[in-house]
Structures are given as structure tokens and as C-alpha cells.
Image (tube, helix red, strand yellow):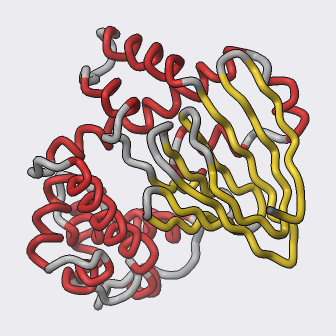
Amino acid sequence: MGKGGVVGFDARKGAVRLSSYQEYDAKLPFAHFSIKLVIEGHERYTVNGQKYEVDKNEYLLANHLVEGSVFIDSQNWVNGLCIDIEMGILSEVVSSIVQSNAMEADPFLDKFFRTSHFLENTYRSSETQLGLFLRGLDKEKVENLALNDEFYYVLSEKIVLDHLPTVKMLQNIASVKISTRKHLYRQVLRGKEFIDFCFHEDLSVADMARAAAMSEYHFFRLFRTLFAQSPYQYLQKKRLQYAKQLLKAEHGSVSEVALLVGFADVQSFSKSFKKYFGFAPSLVLR
């Protein structure tokens, strides 16, 4: 039931739905591989018992094996874009990528997308190939593209390429049960997202592990396994990259930027900056 409506466009290889609701509470069928993008507002999903909060310019991915529901309750209109892709399209794209000599891919990829191995999760549009493509769509473009089979091939290709690193990381987690691998992966991602949002603060590995709801050592070990660097190394990288952006934009002196990005003093900042980039931070200002 809901206050609002949906406009749909069906094609041989998929379907597209543009929705606009203020109130909506219903079970959600996942008949195919599904993309749920929030264009404006906030949506709450439950997928296989896992809750997902999806904000503007974020999207949820899930395959045909899950059960779920969606809840919307807003004073303003919540606009969304839902796209279903036939599983055969994804398999065709995966097969092409696996057979390509130009790309490193694993035959496990097809199993990943077609079975319960798939990691249903939310993503920020600005951080994925699929998300950037979706953000370029408007109602007119959707109407023109939805009946074009090439549209679903392009979407599938971007989904597969986005997930190549994820597949490898999941395989690196030492657990027999895929549900445990997915759970641990999501926990580590929560810790990584905590770093992304709070890197300018005085953070310890204990703080990161707490955000991930894991023990400190377990988080440290899994983070290093998944991202080939320690949490502290990732934190320093985030700080230094942001510092370089600030210096380029002339948002302060070297000492001011050092404090803004979370370094205790300008000496340690300058030393770390030079080691990472190969030149002193003062050269960025020239």
C-alpha cells in the first residue's frame, strides 16, 4: 500500500520502474537481478532479514534469490529508479569477461551473481561505475533507453566490473559458510566507511573496530586481508590525499592543513607527505 505511484517500461531483457511515493510499505519481489536507486529522499529496505537505509544517490543491489520489503514514510516525495535485469544477460557478460585475455576474472563470477554467494549491499553512486552511469539518467533518457537491449548490456558490464574486486576479497575470507563471509565483509566495510567519514579525527584501530562491531585484532587482520593494507595505512592515505586537495585549492597553510586532516603536528605531516608523494607539501602551494 502506498501514497504515490510508479511508471514502468518493460523490455525483452529487463524492466525499468520510475517511482514516486510519500508512503509505501510492501513486500518486494526480486524476480531478476535488481537495482534500487534513490533519486530523491530516503528508502528503507529489508533483504533476507538484513536492514538497509538507502539515501539520495545511493542504490541497493540484490539478485533473484532474496526476499525483501521496502518502507517509505516521508512528508516529501521520495523518487526512485528500479531496474530489473534478466539473469541470462549478466551470465552472458560474465562469460565474455572471463574469456577475455585483457582482464583478470575468475570462473566463480557467474556463480557469484546467480547464487546466494552474491553480496546484496548498498553503494554510493559517486563511487562505482554503475552509480555514475545511473546518475546521468533522467526520465526522458530512461524512456528512450528502457526498451533498448544494449542498455541492459551496459548496466550488466558495469555491475560485473564493479564487483571484480569484491569477488576476490570474499574468496580471501577464510570461512566455509558464504553467509559468514558476507557478514564479515559487511562488518569490515562499516569500519572502512567509519574511517572515510572520520579520518580527520584522532582515530585508533580500536575506534574503527568498534564501528565494525569486531574485536580489534580481528578487524585489523581482516582489513589487511581484504584491502592489502592495514587500517592505519588506509587512514594515513586518506588524510594525505585530502591534504593534497586542500593545498591545491589553497585552503590554508601547510601547518593549518596538517591539523585539518588529523595530524598532531606539521613535522609528522610533512614527513609522511613527502614519503607518500615524493615531494614536500610546501611545493603544492607554489
Q: Position of residue 236 (x, y in %)?
A: 28, 70
Residue 60 versus residue 106 in the image, above or below: below
Left or right: 63, with 4 as reference point = left
Residue 43 versus residue 47 in the image, above or below: below
Q: Residue at x 88, y 65 (%)?
A: 3
Left or right: 25, with 34 as reference point = right
Q: Quadrant of residue 262?
A: bottom left
Left or right: 122, with 97 as reference point = right
- Name the residue nearer the viewer: 74 or 166: 74
Q: Residue at x 17, y 70 (%)?
A: 219
Q: Quadrant of residue 65?
A: top left
| Total numbered circles | 0
Q: Residue at x 73, y 68 (%)?
A: 72
Q: Position of residue 97 (x, y in %)?
A: 38, 16
Q: Quadrant of residue 240?
A: bottom left
- Name the residue nearer the viewer: 99 or 261: 99
Residue 256 versus residue 77 in the image, above or below: below
Q: Residue at x 44, y 30 (%)?
A: 160
Q: Position of residue 115 (x, y in %)?
A: 35, 34
